[in-house]
Amino acid sequence: MGGDAAVQYHHNNNQVFDISLDVGPVHPSKCFDDDGRLKRKGNFWTASAHIITAVIGSGVLSLAWAIAQLGWVAGPIMMLLFSFVTYYTSSLLADCYRSGDPVTGKRNYTYMDAVRSNLGGAKVKLCGFIQYLNLFGISIGYTIGASISMMAIKRSNCFHKSGGQNPCHLSSNPYMIIFGVTEIILSQIPDFDQLWWLSIVAAVMSFTYSSIGLGLGIAQVAENGKFMGSLTGISIGAVTETQKIWRSFQALGDIAFAYAYSIILIEIQDSIRSPPSEAKTMKKATVFSVAVTTVFYMLCGCMGYAAFGDNAPGNLLTGFGFYNPYWLLDIANAAIVVHLVGAYQVYCQPLFAFIEKWAAQQWPDNEFFTKEIKVKIPGFRSYTLNLFRLVWRTAFVVLTTLISMLLPFFNDIVGILGALGFWPLTVFFPVEMYINQKKIPKWSTKWICLQILSLTSLIISIAAAAGSIAGVVLDLKVYKPFKTSY
């Protein structure tokens, strides 16, 4: 997912499968909203900022590669198409924030709540499963991305020292382990994802590395004196016909990943003040932020492709398209690492909280799950230790790190994630909820159009998943586990 800075929202994601008490409408007052919570202060600008920071993330790095597979015609067209679908389904989703009346209806605080109150039944469990599977996948993608960037720093300095004589092959494993250890420590901080400064840091970092990538691309184009690349993308000959098809499909997954942020849309909307109705503000914010993001993506992806043509690397800042100025690349890669360290927690904390809550409900009398032990740390406030939290979170990080070491293919994993999240979370559930909420009759023109949109997206998702899985299979042919070096 392109999304990285989904930071503030998950504060109420802990009640994912629980039934919150419905107290009925509380009359809004100066300090409280109609649901009895503190007055929300968000507006068009804060919502747009949240969406932009959530969307522009590590997904931007694989866009030049994606456009190189599709070419100058299909590449930009597909990006515009994805941005339109994202915008349209997001505006459908905005209408699902309140059930019933759009101004005074009952609020849904999370994506899952919206699915529960609009669709209910098995679909809620399905949605939860897909959402958590996606979060699990994102944590693997981020481990790979961060380790590649750490290696790139080491390699670029080694290249610089040896004047480009030494190929500087490195193993990615030590870097993945460093990242894993860092995440084990951070994941022991409960509610780490709610730290207010985290999303500011994430936003600054993502703009830093995206802009450096863009700037280097422009400089490279100026140096070449022409735009590289072709109308139809990478030529058959450089790759076989089947490879060309799989790679084009995988490129679609990469683009979908760069746009996916529907998971956190409702949480962003829950921070907006009313009147005007939250849905109105949210729709305006969606138009604005999807437009900004698309312009930015077009620039980064197209400049990267224009700079390198068919040889555009899978990850713009680490594929060693650029060697100099080496210190600037180091800054960009350091920014990626810092960003991904925080983003990993943002995506994993809701999953951690959900499993811990579930375990405490299953075994309420077992001290392993429920007992909180106070540990005094000199110079800090005392830390609450829970054995299950310690064991489970550590095991989770160890597992994602091991999987990353087994399958260290950034593009393929990103493509799979994009495909997995795109159809169900960005299209299927919003469309179904909208049909249900607005009581759109079956076989009416609008119903048919929405179903066609959903079906087309499903086909794109399946193609992208197939292409990315084929990519993993091809990569595995030439690869020995735990032995990757770059």
Image: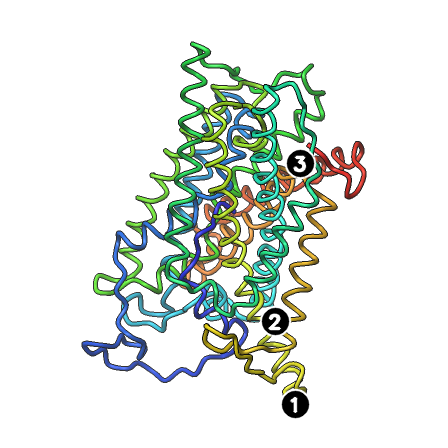
Kind of residue at badge 1: Asp
Sequence-wise, the earlier of marks 2 and 1 is: 2
Sequence-wise, the earlier of marks 3 and 1 is: 1
Sequence-wise, the earlier of marks 3 and 2 is: 2
Tell me the SS state at disc 1: loop
Left or right, 378 with reference to 267: right
Extreme residue in the bottom direction: 365
Kind of residue at badge 2: Ile
Which residue was labeled with disc 2? 355
Tell me the SS state at disc 3: helix
Kind of residue at badge 3: Gly
Q: Quadrant of residue 251?
A: top right
Q: Quadrant of residue 101?
A: bottom left
Relative image position of residue 444 (x, y in whole percent): 44, 52
Which residue was labeled with disc 3? 467
Instruction: Give the camera-side residue of 384 and 49.
Output: 384
**Mark 3: few/some/many CA within 10 Å (<14, 14-19, 20+):** many
Q: CA distance from mark 3 to mark 1?
A: 48 Å
Tell me the residue at 63%/56% (across/down): 181
Extreme residue in the left direction: 30
Which residue was labeled with disc 1? 365
Relative image position of residue 473 (x, y in whole percent): 76, 37
Relative image position of residue 348 (x, y in whole percent): 56, 60
